[in-house]
Amino acid sequence: MGPTLILLSMALAGWLAGFAVLGRILLRHAAAPMPDQAQQRVDTTALSLIIPARNEEKTLPRLLGSLAGQSVRPREIIVVDDHSTDRTAEVAQEWGAKVLASQPLPEGWRGKTWACRQGAGLAAGDMFLFLDADTWFEPQGLQLLLASYVEGVLSVGPYHAVQRPYEQLSAFFNLVMAGGTGAFVLWGGQPRGLFGQVLLVRREDYEKVHGHESVKGRILENFYLAERFRQAGIPMQCVVGQGLCALQMYPDGPQGMIAGWTKGFASGAAQTPWLIMVLIVVWMGGLLLGPFLLATGWLGCAIYLLFAAQLYVLWHRIGAFYWYTALLFPIPLVFYFLVFAWAVLRSGKTVSWKGRKIHAD
């Protein structure tokens, strides 16, 4: 077997590995139900929405406005003001939310985990829906989310509403984050991780694993919470947010985006099951061969286009990524590896996030 054939075989193996680890993103049952099939499975009079918020005066109106436009209403909306220095509390009150001023951050806690824990302590409902402040619901999105719930824990990876060109560089981070949950492998099974932006859980199950207190010092608390739920035998489900909810990640510029991905991504990779990690490595190894494939002739060009088509279809399901981002995939791929390497180097060191100095996991 010649070198060119070996190269092409390795690339094709990588392409297949990508579908093995992410293929169920393409299936309808792995995403939201169709609107005409939605049947509400959660009593909204028992639903408490909990939103940790630190300096979110710009994002809260979009989230709270989207909630006001839903056809279903939760029992309460609680915004936990995590020592904001802007008008976060005032904005939340203007939209009719309950505002809880966070107590001082105790030793060993992260800001988000502490805010979520306090919100859960105030909540009156039997179901908790934790929401990041930079998310928002699509029309009928809350109803569709509640129709997606079966039992145990439901987490949603919001659709990435890409609005600025630099956000295209996040494309691989979004896919690897989804792949790392283990929720979209072709062979099915229980997820091993959860999305952290939208999390629906019964109070009983939340308290059974001691909630956010059990992961109080973690940046990617969602991955560590998943382990607690799994150990307790509580079923978990992950869905992609297309048609349900969306977010714009890191709208403040490339520097904020790099800081955001740096603060805990290496730790999240360390929590990924070994088989899924192997498949991701094989997939990305094939992707790295992309530029070299173009020099091997028509067959190499065909495999390159297969990778581009694969990425376009996957990215289309999780975000508003441009078609030419898929065609030029080596660019966001190089960005991914550079930031990931930086995250590994910064692991355990101090980084700045939302005005706080924190140690990256």
Image: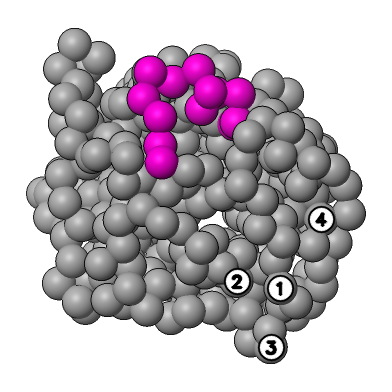
Tell me where residue 282 sits by quadrant: bottom left
Decide which of 314, 44 is in the foreground and name it: 44
Residue 68 drawn in magenta: yes
Helix or strand or loop: what does disc 1 sit on?
A: loop
- Whether residues under marks 2 and 1 lie with C-beta atoms below 8 angstroms apart, the answer is yes
Report the residue marked by disc 1. 103
Indicate the amino acid at tag 1. Gln
Indicate the amino acid at tag 3. Glu
Query: Can you say whether 323 is above or below 27 in the image?
Result: above
* Residue 303 visible somewhere in the drawing: no
Mark sitting earlier along the chain (2/1)? 1
Tell me where residue 102 sits by quadrant: bottom right
Q: Position of residue 158 (x, y in %)?
A: 46, 36
- Whether residues under marks 2 and 4 lie with C-beta atoms below 8 angstroms apart, the answer is no
Using residue 194 as the reference point, say whether residue 21 is left or right of it. Answer: left
Report the residue marked by disc 2. 114
Report the residue marked by disc 3. 107
Q: Position of residue 219 (x, y in %)?
A: 58, 69
Q: Position of residue 248 (x, y in %)?
A: 63, 32
In 3D space, how far apart are the residues under numbered discs 4 and 1 (Cα atoms)?
12 Å
In 3D space, how far apart are the residues under numbered discs 2 and 4 (Cα atoms)?
14 Å
Q: Residues within 10 Å of mark 2 (few under 14, many from 20)?
A: many
Location of the C terminus by quadrant is bottom right
Q: Which residues are magenta?
A: 63-75
